Image (cartoon, rainbow, N blue to C red):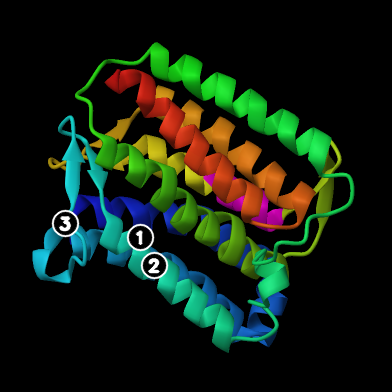
Amino acid sequence: MTAAVLTQLSLGLLVLVPCLLLGWRRARAEPMVTLLLLGIYLADCLLLDLTNRYEPLRLIPTRVWDGFLICNWSGKLYSVLLVLALVAVVRGPLDRAVVGLTLRQRTGWRLPSLAVLAALAAWATAVGLSSPQGPWDPATLAYLAVMPGLNEELVYRGALPALIDRLVPGRVNLLGASLGWGLATTTVLFALLHGVWLDAAWSVRVDLIALRNAAVTGLAFAWLRARTGSLLLPVAAHGLVDFLFFLPRMV
């Protein structure tokens, strides 16, 4: 098992197991929800790791920018297709509307959502301008604008929150958006996955800047998901933020 997979499994257990304990009665009544929750998370982790390790699995060659940023088109595409297939087959807990696969936006979404988008764009640009420079790479920018948003929003603001909310009901209003346990939990998990990892020597490493960035953006994406009722703006916002994080570093 690689350090990357062990990191993801450990963080997943740390965050998801308490949800299962809180929703134990519902989990026993609907074991399929628990299987889907753990299965989607595990599959997403493994697909990314396996396509990084085994070249024959790659539909599109993997790129590495500046020695650290891995552009894994294939792993993320496999994960997207898997979740979409499950949504097409599984009714109830993974209903399209519950996951956020709809173009319909909730009433009054425009002004507050566009304000959040503008704030995210300004903040991402500022962070990018203050970060170390790297080589110009338009292919990496294209990847950042498309794949992380599609994959991570579908998993962390779509499928996983829908399943957690099924097990642990309850919501809180945050600046006009109704957030459930699902979005709160996956926001924490999203931040940890970006800022905590095991290195090759199996030592725990923490990047406080990456943790901060992922916490801020993850909360904003979760708010957009709850406020609009759709994954459309979270996906667009995620792509915009990742693009603007790295564009200033390349020019």
Q: Please state which amino acid type lies under the numbered disc 2.
A: Ser
- The residue singled out by tag 3 in the image is 61
207 drawn magenta: no
The residue depicted at 29 percent of the width and 33 percent of the height is 205
Vertical relation: 230 (above or below) 97: above
Question: Closer to us: mark 3 or mark 2?
Answer: 3
Categorize mark 3 by other alpha carbons within 10 Å: few (<14), some (14-19), many (20+).
some
Name the foreground residue: 178 vs 81: 81
Q: Please state which amino acid type lies under the numbered disc 3.
A: Pro
Percent x, y for residue 141?
33, 37
- The residue singled out by tag 1 in the image is 76
Categorize mark 1 by other alpha carbons within 10 Å: few (<14), some (14-19), many (20+).
many
Secondary element type, mark 3 = loop
Q: Is residue 194 visible?
A: yes
What's the CA distance linking mark 3 and mark 1?
Answer: 13 Å
Is tag 3's residue or tag 2's residue first in the polypeptide sequence?
3
Residue range (magenta): 181-188
In the rendered image, the residue lying farthest to the front is: 138
Vertical relation: 224 (above or below) 124: below
- The residue singled out by tag 2 in the image is 79
Vertical relation: 101 (above or below) 234: below
Looking at the rendering, in which quadrant would you find the C terminus? top left
Q: Is residue 21 visible?
A: no
